[in-house]
Amino acid sequence: MHFAELARAYERLEATTKRLEMRTILADLVRPIRPPDLARVLYLSQGLLRPEYEGVELGVADSLARRAVALATGAEEPDVARRAKESGDLGSTTAELLGKGRRLDANEPLSVAGVYADLSRIAAAKGPGSQEEKVAILAQLLGRATPVEGKFVVRFVLGTLRVGVREMTILDALAEAFGDGAKATRARIESAFNLTSDLGLVAGVLVDRGVDGLEKVGVEVGRPIRPMLAEREPDLASVLERMGGRAALEYKYDGLRVQAHVPARGPVRLFSRRLEEISAQFPELVEELRTAVGSPPAILEGECVPIDLDTDEIQPFQEVSRRRGRKHDLARVQEEVPVCLFVFDVLYAGSEPVYLKDFAERRALLESILRPTDRVRLAVQEVVADVASATRFFEQAIAAGGEGVMAKSLKDGSAYRAGARGYWWIKYKREYTAGLSDSIDGVVVGAFLGRGRRAGRYGAFLLAVYDPEHDRFESFCKVGTGFDDARLEEMPKRLRPFEADAAPAGIETGLVPDRWMRPGVVLEVRGAELTLSPIHRAARGEVRPEAGLALRFPRFTGRFRDDKGPTEATTSGELLSMYRSQVRQAAPSSGSEGAPG
Ligand code: AMP
């Protein structure tokens, strides 16, 4: 196929903004094309050389492209730069310069295969001297191009191809060109794409084996699957109703979705929700997935969240973003911001795809193949059949640092639906409040032994507020964040006089610390917000029966309140009014008490 044909189609595509017209132009373009040109044309039209997940980049900056244009056209580089600045598009400038008194008929016409091969060589050039190599290949290619071809080559190289062809339009066009154009056909093509994330591959199968052939296109380890997405409901009663009265609820972790491909041999690869490869960002997950997955190959899905490995507390998501894009110094960042992958699905296991199995079966399979490690764990799950249990689980999720719950249908047909949003998964989130501005003075009533870097010392502390009415201490959080080394050293010394062998009288909590403490030491903490909790006992029953108040994302401010005795700490009543004023500030969508039921 001549590249000129493709360039002509691009000109027509550029001239329209109507999706229907685009579809016809594209369908007409691809209809006569056969593999392997077909895949090339599809990738090129999206501004790609390979399916997006492979992350192939040309690595050509504006300045390199200008040099190539200058070489190819004989213009001076400053002149090229000036013209491009004026036109705002180096592509048009290239066309203009190429059109100046050149005899093109002396050249062999460019083929799609040839252009594609040159562009691939440009992408492949890496390391010392590669810039020169890229310029040389591009200049040579442009030297053989017509003005229109040159325009599109340059735009492609710079990532400014403005033909606006998106995946969905291409799928439409494929259905029209190679199928009967019917909705059902389009759906089958799309589902093959959702499983493979590769339009070139899908189009090839379609042409060679027809629509029925697409049924054989499956999931492969190493090739990301487009993620299944969730619908939402305003409350837990509606969630349960949608799911037929019974559902598996999971913590909804607030982090990055990760699809982990663990091959039998070769490197583990991680893909983001947008199917970008992110393996290099999380080397520790790559490593632990090898240990956690006993019998590869497997494809797992989970949410990656920052975690304090010493206390097991989930940290706010912003912590992870500190790692994004950090290529250097990864070892230090890994230590500063450890992450944990909470695995919630399995799509491939035991040498076969399992995404078509019902969810309960997939979860059972997941539990059987995963050997949890520090950084790779199972998503916390509970099967519920009534609103009260669902509410309790939701509160537990919030208290543990989750942003809500994800309900998963247990009905027949609850297969993993790649790339689709539907009511098989329903999210129910807690809307965030403006945040808690006040600090809280909490009494230490227990301590937990540390792990990791904090092994052999206390890693976290159980804090309580004082209830003067009943003269007791009611827990509201477990805090391990905010302690520097010096303060951590200091804690055992400060606490020693208060250590107790059993739970002292007058302490109300649903947690059992490694070491109980008689109330004595007061710490100042801050947190994101107060939430209802089945575990903590502050102001229990005041907002709702069986629920206490808990501080989400607690953090020690570094300040010991030596000026305060335990009964001078924050009281349950104060905590309750903080909770109430926070609910009043919250957006109406967060519900009157910040929780359903
Ligand atoms: P949202 O981004 O608000 O539409 O919520 C969907 C996202 O929640 C998914 O794409 C996952 O990244 C994330 N998520 C967190 N926990 C879970 C879970 N247990 N199951 C499924 N998705 C989860």
Image (tube, rainbow, N blue to C red):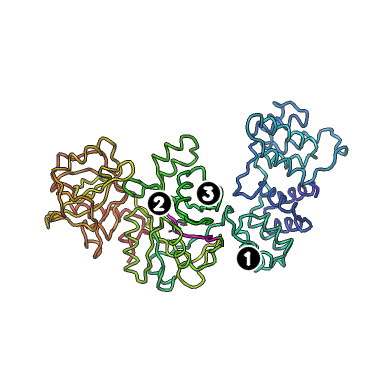
Q: Residue at point 21% right, 37% down?
A: 490
Q: Which residue carries the number 2 mark?
A: 373
- In the displayed structure, 356 sits above or below 276; it is below
Distance of label 3 from label 2 (alpha carbons): 16 Å
Residue at the image point whose x is 37% and y is 71% from the top: 385
Q: Quadrant of ligand 1?
A: bottom left
User: Counting residues from the N terminus, which is met first, the one under dot 3 or under dot 2?
Assistant: 3
Q: Residue at left 72%, top 65%?
A: 210
Q: Which mark is first along the chain, 1 or 3?
A: 1
Q: Quadrant of residue 595?
A: bottom left
**Distance from the alpha carbon under mark 3 to that under mark 1:** 31 Å
Q: Is mark 3 within 8 Å of ligand 1?
A: no
Residue picked out by circle 3: 268
Amino acid type, callout 3: Val
* Place of residue 260 in the rendered image (x, y in percent of width and height, measured from the top left): 51, 52
Which residue is rendered at x = 67% and y = 56% of the image? 201
Quadrant location of residue 86? top right
State the residue position of label 1: 187
Q: Position of residue 590 (x, y in %)?
A: 36, 58
Residue 292 at x, y percent in the picture: 45, 53
Q: Helix or strand or loop: what does disc 3 sit on? A: loop
